[in-house]
Structure formats: C-alpha cells, structure tokens
Amino acid sequence: MFIGEYQHSIDEKGRLAIPVKFRAKLSGGAVVTRGLDRCLFLYPMDAWNALAEKLVKLPISQSKSRAFSRLMLAGAMDVTLDRQGRIILPEYLREYADTNKKVVVAGLYDRLEIWDEAAWKKYKTATEQESNEIAETLGELGV
C-alpha cells in the first residue's frame, strides 16, 4: 500500500529517486504513464496489469473509452529501479506533467502520483478548501 507525500527532485538526466519505503513494492517492475489532473501515475506491475486488463475491455465503439485508453496505454512506459532506487521519467511524460526539478511523490494506495511541486500545492490547496463539499458528496455514495 502506498500512502504519504514526499518531496524529491528530478535530475538533469530525468531520474527520480523513489522514496525508500516504496521501493520494495516496485522492485518487480513498474509502469509510469500519463495520469489525470496533469500528473503522472506510477503503478507496480501487478496493479498496472489489472488496470490494463480493464482498459482493453472498454468498448472501442465509444470515443471516450478510446480516448481514455489512449491516454493511459499509449503514454505508458516500463521502468525499473536502478541501484540507487531511481527511475527514468521519459521526456514526453515530464512535459505532459510540466514537471520542473522539484516534484512531489504522493502515495494513493495502489499507485504513486508524481506532481510538479507547484502544481501539487495549488491542487492540494483547492481540494482542501472544498473538503466539506467533497465529503458530503462521497457520503451520499456510502464512503
């Protein structure tokens, strides 16, 4: 399970050090892809395979299904941890997420999200301001 948020930096070669507590779960391989809200999603291989199986079952006749599958699958890249626990983030994904040097790695149970630090702060502030409304909506859904 991934939880918590951590500040890290991307080096000049596009490498990102994964927080130590998450490395074991990613040691069997991982996939990084375009996420929602202009962040990147990093999945351990087992969680990625489960998601990919669901995506390929979406109806190809529906434009939104095709678009979401393309967003997630065409943008995906296999990554492996090096000896220092780093992964290489491809340039096209760094551009998508508009990541500069400083990023936040946020644990969200079955995946990690990688955010530009400034974008994360802006998103988090907005979400915190709406937390009561969000809680009420989720309460109606039984959460």
Image: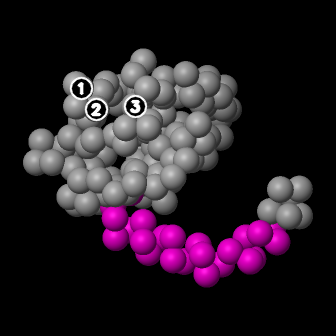
- What crowding class fits label 2: few (fewer than 14 Cα within 10 Å), some (14-19), or many (20 or more)? some
Q: Is the residue under label 3 in contact with that under label 1 (CB below 8 Å)?
A: no
Q: Is the residue under label 2 in contact with that under label 3 (CB below 8 Å)?
A: yes
Percent x, y for residue 54? 65, 28
Mark 3 or mark 2, earlier in chain = 3
Residue at left offset 27%, top offset 41%: 17
Q: Main secondary structure of the magenta part?
A: helix
Residue 95 horizontal side relative to residue 122, left or right: left
Percent x, y for residue 78? 35, 26
- Quadrant showing the C terminus: bottom right
Marks 1/3: CA distance? 10 Å
Q: Is residue 114 magenta?
A: no
Q: Is the residue under label 1 in contact with that under label 2 (CB below 8 Å)?
A: yes
Up-down relation of residue 10 to residue 126 (above or below) = above
Which dot marks residue 23?
3
Q: Give the magenta range.
A: 115-137
Q: State the SS at label 1.
A: loop
- What crowding class fits label 1: few (fewer than 14 Cα within 10 Å), some (14-19), or many (20 or more)? few
Residue at left offset 66%, top offset 78%: 130
Residue at left offset 49%, top offset 70%: 123
Marks 3/2: CA distance? 7 Å
Up-down relation of residue 29 to residue 94 (above or below) = above
User: Farthest bottom residue?
Assistant: 129
Marks 2/1: CA distance? 5 Å
Which dot marks residue 85?
2
Which dot marks residue 82?
1
Residue type, numbered disc 1: Asp
Residue 14 horizontal side relative to residue 122, left or right: left
Residue type, numbered disc 3: Arg
User: Farthest front residue?
Assistant: 21
Up-down relation of residue 132 to residue 69 (above or below) = below
